[in-house]
Image: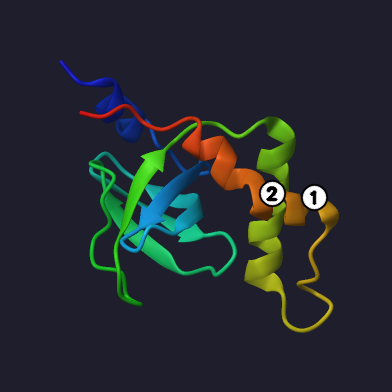
C-alpha cells in the first residue's frame, strides 16, 4: 500500500505548481512541464532553470549544479495559481525591460508562496 507521500508525488502532473527546497534550503516555486509514470520535469518559475525528478521527489543531477527535493504538492488557490502561471510565462518570454516588470500580485506571490507551501508540507514517510 502506498503512503500518502507516495500517492501525492505519484499524482504530480503537467501544469501543477509544486514547491521544493534546494540542497541549501532555498524554496523553489516550480511548474511541472513534463511528466510520466516514473519521473517529471519542472522549471523554477522565476529563474526558468529546470530539474528532472524521480517520483520520490528528489532531483536528478541539475545541469546548473545542486539538488532539489519536493516538499509540497499542495494546490495554490486559483487566483495565486493563475498569477504563478502568468509569471512563468512572463519570465520565459521576456526579452528586455519592461517585459519582466512584476505586478503587485506577482510580487506578493514571490514574497508569500513559501508560507503557503510550508504550511502544507507532504507527510513524512
For the C terminus, the quadrant is top left
Q: Nearer the viewer, residue 41 or 64?
A: 64
Is residue 95 visible to the viewer in this orientation of the structure?
A: yes
Q: Residue at the spot x=31%, y=43% of the render? A: 36
Residue 1's spot in the image, x, y percent?
15, 15
Rendered view: 23 above or below 94:
above
Q: Which residue is mark 1?
A: 105
Mark 2 near mark 1, Cβ–Cβ under 8 Å? yes
Task: Give the x, y percent position of residue 11.
Answer: 37, 30
Give the distance between the C-alpha atoms of the residues marked 2 and 1, in whole angstroms.
6 Å
Q: Pointer 1: residues within 10 angstroms few (<14), some, or many (20+)?
A: some
Compared to residue 60, the image places residue 95 above or below, namely below
Locate residue 37 relative to residue 32 in the image: left or right.
left
Residue 100 drawn above or below residue 45: below
Secondary-structure class at tag 1: helix
Q: Is residue 77 left or right of residue 39?
A: right
Residue in the image at 26% along x and 50% along y: 58
Front residue of 36 and 53? 53
Image point 74% across, 36% down: which residue?
A: 79
Vertical position of residue 43 compared to residue 80: above or below:
below
Q: Dot 2: what SS?
A: helix
Q: Which residue is mark 2?
A: 109
Work out whether residue 20 or residue 15 is closer to the camera in this orientation and state it.
Answer: 20
Amino acid at each position: 500500500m502506498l503512503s500518502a507521500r507516495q500517492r501525492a508525488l505519484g499524482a504530480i502532473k503537467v501544469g501543477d505548481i509544486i514547491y521544493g527546497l534546494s540542497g541549501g534550503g532555498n524554496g523553489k516555486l516550480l511548474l511541472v512541464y513534463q511528466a510520466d509514470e516514473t519521473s517529471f520535469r519542472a522549471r523554477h518559475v522565476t529563474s526558468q532553470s529546470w530539474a528532472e525528478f524521480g517520483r520520490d521527489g528528489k532531483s536528478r543531477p541539475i545541469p546548473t549544479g545542486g539538488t532539489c527535493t519536493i516538499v509540497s504538492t499542495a494546490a495554490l488557490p486559483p487566483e495565486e495559481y493563475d498569477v504563478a502561471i502568468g509569471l512563468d510565462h512572463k519570465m520565459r518570454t521576456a526579452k528586455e525591460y519592461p517585459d519582466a516588470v512584476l505586478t503587485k500580485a506577482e510580487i506578493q506571490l514571490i514574497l508569500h508562496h513559501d508560507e503557503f507551501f510550508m504550511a502544507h508540507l507532504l507527510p513524512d514517510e
